[in-house]
Image (spheres, rainbow, N blue to C red):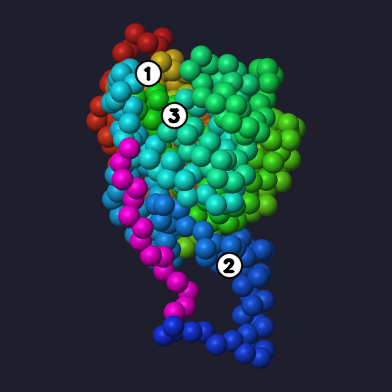
Amino acid sequence: MTKRSKRRSSKKLSSNTQRAVLGGTTGIVIIIIALIAQFVFGIDVLHTDEQNIEPTAVIDNNGNGNGSSVLTPIAGGYDGGWFQLYFTQPINSQDESRFNGSPLENAVVNLLNSATQSIDGAFYEMNSQPITDALINAHERGVRVRVVTDGEFGLEQPDTTVDQLELAGIPITSDGTRGAFMHNKFFVVDSLFVWTGSTNFTHNDIYNNNNNSILIRSSQLAQNYSAEFEELFGGNFGKTSDQSIRNPSVTIEGTQIETIFESEGSAPDRMAQLIESANTVQFMAFSFTEGLRYGQDRAIMDLLVERFEAGGFTLQGVVEASSRRFIEPMYCAGVDVRQDGNPDVLHHKVFIIDGSIVVMGSFNFSNNASDDNDENMLIIHNRDIAQAYLEEFARRWAEAETIPQSSYSC
């Protein structure tokens, strides 16, 4: 394991040499405005209980407040102050001795090691021993640890480490054998930090597949994910989950973040809204099918093709080679789409819209994800984060391959 990231001091709202003195009516008015911003408009200004909780890899607040952030390159990704963004770096190996040192895996371990109060994890599958050990260690030092997992892939896979959590006394809920998947990959730590993305906590996803994950510091975003976790932990899966979201849109350091949970949500409808007003779309997709429908049974893929054929709309995509058959309408329409070049799996679930909006999370672009599974999606309005994803798109595009004409009957 690599050394833990060096701590950096967070910016403070006040110091010994600079104090805000609130008095009389002025103080009351300011407090009322702050409360309205926090609880009515979803602006995360109070940072509830954040002052004394800090992960090993520090998230400080240095955004410039206009939907952009100061991104500092770190191993495996970027530090943006209130977030850290990671992309996997595939080594394409089945030699378990090489499964160590991943910056993404280390970041998860550091986050879990930093927990002082609670860890709630909802994940499709797990066999990462370092992450498993970090959960058990947290449980043993008195942190409340709870887990929700998929009944098949979380519990029944031969190499799963979820059984180790169970033996350690960590309470676990699964979705049993209902057919659909509990497909999330998220952690909520100390009611303050949210880790989410496309990355399963497995050797293949961390070391061989192309994936992305983000760690965000926001008590309001954590409230969303904690509420979803409670529903899942209570056995409410799929469309039986509550459709309401405490903070459907939060603003952190000038960046708007929308939260959607499926299959009780409306992810395709929101995607269609964004696409209809977009000038450019790039996507990286493990699975993208015509079954992803919005509105009155219209397909997202058909919407993209219509926008492309009408002109004035740039559309590019990289799809996992094993699922290339699903994007025939795009290929036959002349859309610039390629199959990935990773000998393992391109596992991203990403749309980049107008170079300023990123759609990411566990949500595959399919009817199963929108109608049956338990999934989460974030829509992040931040140009610098979008630029980081465009750089990942460029890397995947450079190694991608032309799809053979024989793949389709255009």
Determine which residue is flagged by label 2. Answer: 46
Residues shaded magenta:
1-15
For residue 181, the mark is none
Is 288 contained in the magenta span? Answer: no
Mark 2 to mark 1: distance in Å?
Answer: 46 Å
Circle 3 — which element? helix
Q: Amino acid at mark 2?
A: Leu
Circle 1 — which element? helix
Residue 117 image position (x, y, % from top left): 59, 51
Residue 133 image position (x, y, % from top left): 47, 34
In this rendering, the label closer to the viewer, 3 or 1 = 3
Determine which residue is flagged by label 1. Answer: 321
Residue 6 image position (x, y, % from top left): 32, 55
Q: Is residue 373 above or below residue 31?
A: above
Q: Main secondary structure of the magenta part?
A: loop
| First of labels 2, 1 by sequence position | 2
Determine which residue is flagged by label 3. Answer: 129
Question: Is residue 239 something that shows in the picture?
Answer: no
Q: Amino acid at mark 1?
A: Ala
| First of labels 3, 1 by sequence position | 3
Question: Is residue 9 something that shows in the picture?
Answer: yes
Graded by Cα atoms within 10 Å as few (under 14), some (14 to 19) or many (20 or more), the crowding at tag 2 reads some
Image quarter in which the C terminus is found: top left
Mark 3 to mark 1: distance in Å?
Answer: 29 Å
Give the residue furthest to the bottom: 24
Q: Amino acid at mark 3?
A: Gln
Image quarter in which the N terminus is found: top left
Q: Nearer the viewer, residue 207 or 302?
A: 207
Q: Nearer the viewer, residue 38 or 397?
A: 38
Q: Is residue 27 left or right of residue 288?
A: right
